[in-house]
Image (cartoon, grey):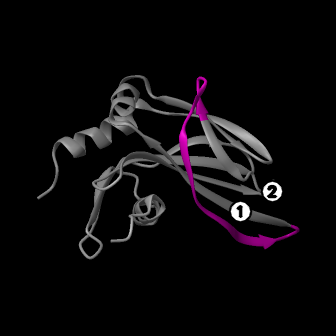
């Protein structure tokens, strides 16, 4: 049996829930995976960039924060690490895309995930979760609000049948 790819779970959840502004559950009956997710939260927004996130729970791989960073004219960040108050986090690169170019600049999209333990999610549901993404060409600090974790914990506690 082939090992399950974390990136596939996060990517499926990102594409299936990215346009939703409400928490929910995405189930793929063919693959046999179910992902509970929070609404999408804008964590950092500037004139030419933004960082959005949602919290998810896969019945196969547990908890994670799915991150989407996009920018226009600023170049690639190439995020490869995530840290929180001196603790190196389990960061996974999911996708890096050139969305398009025009008028002398390009828009890029970088997607990744931070895997989290159940105990870290319980703590984050009270305090929120602060972290820093580090890349070859820069870094960004953000905080996921406690509400995002609460939304997912509520769904995990009351699974759909």
Picture coordinates of residue 70, whole percent (x, y): 66, 56
Residue at the image position 15 percent from the left and 45 percent from the top: 158
- Residue found farthest to the bottom: 30
Q: Secondary structure at mark 1?
A: strand
Residue 71 relative to residue 54: left or right: right
Residue position marked by numbered label 1 in the rendering? 108
Q: Secondary structure at mark 2?
A: loop
Query: Quadrant of the image for the N terminus?
Result: bottom left
Residue 116, by quadrant, is: top left
State the mark number for residue 75: 2
Q: Which residues are magenta?
A: 83-104
Q: Judge whether residue 44 is colored magenta.
A: no
Quadrant where the C terminus is found in the figure: bottom left
Q: Please give the name of the residue rendered at 61% of the width and 39% of the height, measured from the top-left corner.
A: 82
Report the Cα–Cα distance between label 1 and label 2: 7 Å
Question: Is-magenta flag for residue 95?
Answer: yes
- Which mark is first along the chain, 2 or 1? 2
- Residue 83 is situated, as x and y percent measured from the top left of the image, at 60, 33
Where is residue 144 shown, x and y percent of the image? 49, 35
User: Looking at the image, which is closer to me, 103 or 63?
Assistant: 63
Q: Is residue 153 left or right of residue 93?
A: left
Q: Position of residue 51 (x, y in %)?
A: 61, 47
Disc assigned to residue 4 = none
Instruction: Look at the numbered discs 1 and 2 and tell me whether their residues touch, using CB distance below 8 Å.
Output: yes
Query: Few, some or many C-alpha atoms within 10 Å of disc 1 (few <14, some 14-19, many ≥20)?
Result: many
Q: Nearer the viewer, residue 95 or 69?
A: 95
Which residue is rendered at x = 31% and y = 43% of the image? 152
Above/below status of 62 relative to 129: below
**Mainly helix, strand or loop, the magenta region?**
strand
Horizontal arrangement in the rendering, residue 4 relative to residue 89 (left or right): left
The image quarter containing residue 10 is: bottom left
């Amino acid at each position: 049996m082939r090992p399950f790819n974390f990136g596939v779970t996060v990517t499926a959840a990102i594409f299936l829930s990215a346009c939703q502004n409400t928490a929910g559950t995405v189930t793929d009956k063919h693959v046999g995976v179910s992902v509970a997710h929070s609404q999408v939260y804008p964590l950092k927004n500037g004139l030419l960039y933004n960082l959005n996130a949602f919290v998810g729970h896969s019945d196969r791989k547990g908890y994670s924060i799915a991150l989407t960073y996009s920018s226009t004219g600023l170049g690639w960040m190439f995020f490869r690490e995530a840290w929180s108050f001196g603790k190196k986090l389990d960061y996974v690169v999911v996708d890096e895309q050139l969305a398009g170019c025009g008028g002398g600049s390009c828009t890029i999209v970088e997607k990744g995930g931070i895997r989290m333990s159940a105990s870290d999610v319980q703590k984050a549901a009270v305090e929120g979760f602060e972290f820093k993404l580090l890349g070859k060409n820069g870094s960004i600090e953000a905080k996921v609000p406690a509400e995002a974790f609460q939304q997912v914990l509520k769904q995990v506690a009351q699974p759909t049948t």
